[in-house]
Image (tube, rainbow, N blue to C red):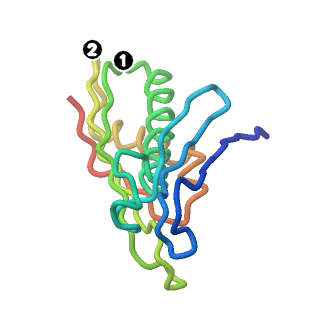
């Protein structure tokens, strides 16, 4: 099995650490060279200690689930002979309390909008493609949060 790595780096930029008055802005670096500015969510840690311009872990989790689903969907659609020309997902992550009473990401809703050229899948084929993509997605299989695909919309 593969190993995936990320380097997460933070450095104190001033006084106030012991009192919780420090920046949560940090950096994510990935093995392919991508670097992202990250921070805690302003929903969790108030400004100015969070940086809303940074990707927060909750957003990253939602994006990972959406991206994994999309990549499997594209692969499966291609195998079935569908020509996908555009895929956009306005995914949403919902925080709440899990079964143990902890604050957690409890639901991720994927809202894909897909454009096809030529033959388009009928509603049953589209639903089957999404179900198969969900079943194959490593991220969805790794989560305890519910991951659902909203009623598929194809153009």
Would you call the spot at circle 1 few (<14 residues within 10 Å), some (14-19), or many (20 or more)?
A: some
Q: In this view, does 136 lie above or below 24?
A: above
Q: Residue at x 50, y 72 (%)?
A: 20
Which residue is labeled 1 in the image? 83
Q: Quadrant of residue 45?
A: bottom left
Q: Which residue is drawn at 39% across and 74% down?
A: 96
- Classify residue 11 as left or right of residue 25: right
- Residue 67 position within the rendered picture, expressed as x and y whole percent measured from the top left: 46, 38
Would you call the spot at circle 2 few (<14 residues within 10 Å), some (14-19), or many (20 or more)?
A: few
As helix, strand or loop, the secondary structure at mark 2 comes to loop
- Classify residue 40 as left or right of residue 89: right
Q: Which of 124 and 39 is in front in this view?
A: 39
- Residue 27 position within the rendered picture, expressed as x and y whole percent measured from the top left: 55, 43
Q: Which residue lies furthest to the top in this view?
A: 118
Contact flag, marks 1 and 2 (Cβ < 8 Å): yes
Which residue is labeled 2 in the image? 118
- Residue 138 position within the rendered picture, expressed as x and y whole percent measured from the top left: 60, 46
Which mark identifies residue 94? Answer: none
Q: In which quarter of the image is residue 124?
A: top left
- Residue 13 position within the rendered picture, expressed as x and y whole percent measured from the top left: 53, 53
Q: In this view, does 67 lie above or below 12?
A: above
Q: Which residue lies furthest to the left in this view?
A: 155
- Classify residue 29 as left or right of residue 130: right
1 or 2: tag closer to the N-terminus: 1
Q: Nearer the viewer, residue 142 or 134?
A: 142
As helix, strand or loop, the secondary structure at mark 1 comes to strand
Q: Which residue is drawn at 27% across and 39% down?
A: 123
């Amino acid at each position: 099995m593969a190993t995936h790595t990320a380097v997460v780096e933070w450095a104190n930029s001033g006084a106030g650490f012991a009192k919780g008055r420090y920046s949560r802005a940090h950096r994510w670096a990935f093995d392919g060279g991508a670097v992202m500015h990250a921070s805690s969510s302003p929903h969790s840690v108030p400004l100015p200690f969070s940086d809303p311009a940074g990707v927060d872990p909750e957003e990253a989790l939602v994006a990972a689930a959406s991206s994994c689903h999309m990549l499997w969907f594209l692969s499966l659609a291609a195998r079935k002979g569908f020509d996908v020309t555009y895929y956009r997902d306005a995914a949403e992550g919902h925080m709440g309390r899990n079964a143990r009473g902890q604050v957690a990401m409890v639901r991720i809703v994927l809202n894909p909008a897909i454009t096809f050229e030529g033959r388009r899948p009928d509603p049953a084929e589209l639903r089957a493609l999404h179900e198969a993509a969900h079943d194959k997605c490593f991220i969805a299989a790794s989560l305890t949060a519910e991951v659902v695909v909203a009623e598929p919309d194809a153009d």
